[in-house]
Image (cartoon, rainbow, N blue to C red):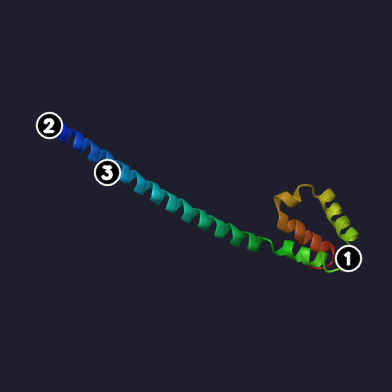
């Protein structure tokens, strides 16, 4: 037999320990999620840098003054008309084709 005072104290201690464990679990989960988010962000940034080489080359070429802005727009419009949706499906191929049509790439 346990006295009601001891049973109440025991229950209070159990509740206190459960709360402390939940706080620790929450902190760990937050830390894990933060680390995972940082990892995904850095991977996405690295992937974007690797994948945007033709895009960056096209931007540099288009602002270099070798063609007028209207000619650049005409190139883009022609390619979009010939291959609709290419820019969203495969942006690197889109920009590579633009550079090829402009005579920048062989």
* In the depicted structure, whether residue 37 falls above or below residue 105: above
Toward the viewer: 5 or 33?
5
Q: Quadrant of residue 65?
A: bottom right
User: Which residue is pictured at 39% across the width and 46% down the height?
Assistant: 26
Instruction: List the residue tagged with mark 2.
Output: 3
Toward the viewer: 106 or 96?
96
Instruction: List the residue tagged with mark 1.
Output: 67
Q: Are marks 3 and 1 in contact (CB under 8 Å)?
A: no
Left or right, 60 with respect to 37, comes to right
3 vs 1, front mark:
3
Left or right, 13 with respect to 70, comes to left
Left or right, 30 with respect to 79, comes to left
Q: Quadrant of the N terminus?
A: top left
Q: Quadrant of the C terminus?
A: bottom right
The first of marks 1 and 2 along the sequence is 2
User: Which residue is pictured at 60% across the width and 60% down the height?
Assistant: 45
SS assignment at label 3: helix
Q: Position of residue 41 (x, y in %)?
A: 56, 56
Instruction: List the residue tagged with mark 3.
Output: 17
Give the distance between the C-alpha atoms of the residues marked 1 and 2, in whole angstroms: 92 Å
Left or right, 81 with respect to 12, comes to right
Q: Are marks 1 and 2 in contact (CB under 8 Å)?
A: no
Give the distance between the C-alpha atoms of the residues marked 3 and 1, in whole angstroms: 72 Å
Q: Which mark is residue 85?
A: none
* In the depicted structure, whether residue 85 falls above or below residue 62: above
Badge 1: how crowded within 10 Å, few (<14), some, or many (20+)?
few
SS assignment at label 2: loop
The first of marks 3 and 1 along the sequence is 3
SS assignment at label 1: loop
Q: Position of residue 80 (x, y in %)?
A: 82, 50
Residue that lies at the very extreme toward the front in this rendered image: 5
């Amino acid at each position: 037999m346990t006295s009601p005072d001891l049973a109440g104290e025991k229950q209070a201690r159990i509740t206190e320990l459960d709360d402390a464990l939940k706080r620790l679990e929450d902190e760990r989960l937050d830390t894990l999620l933060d680390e995972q988010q940082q990892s995904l962000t850095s991977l996405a940034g690295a992937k974007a840098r690797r994948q945007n080489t033709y895009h960056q080359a096209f931007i540099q070429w288009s602002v270099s003054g070798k063609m007028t802005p209207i000619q650049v727009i005409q190139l883009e419009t022609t390619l979009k008309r010939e291959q609709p949706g290419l820019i969203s499906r495969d942006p690197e191929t889109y920009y590579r084709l633009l550079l090829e049509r402009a005579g920048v790439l062989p």
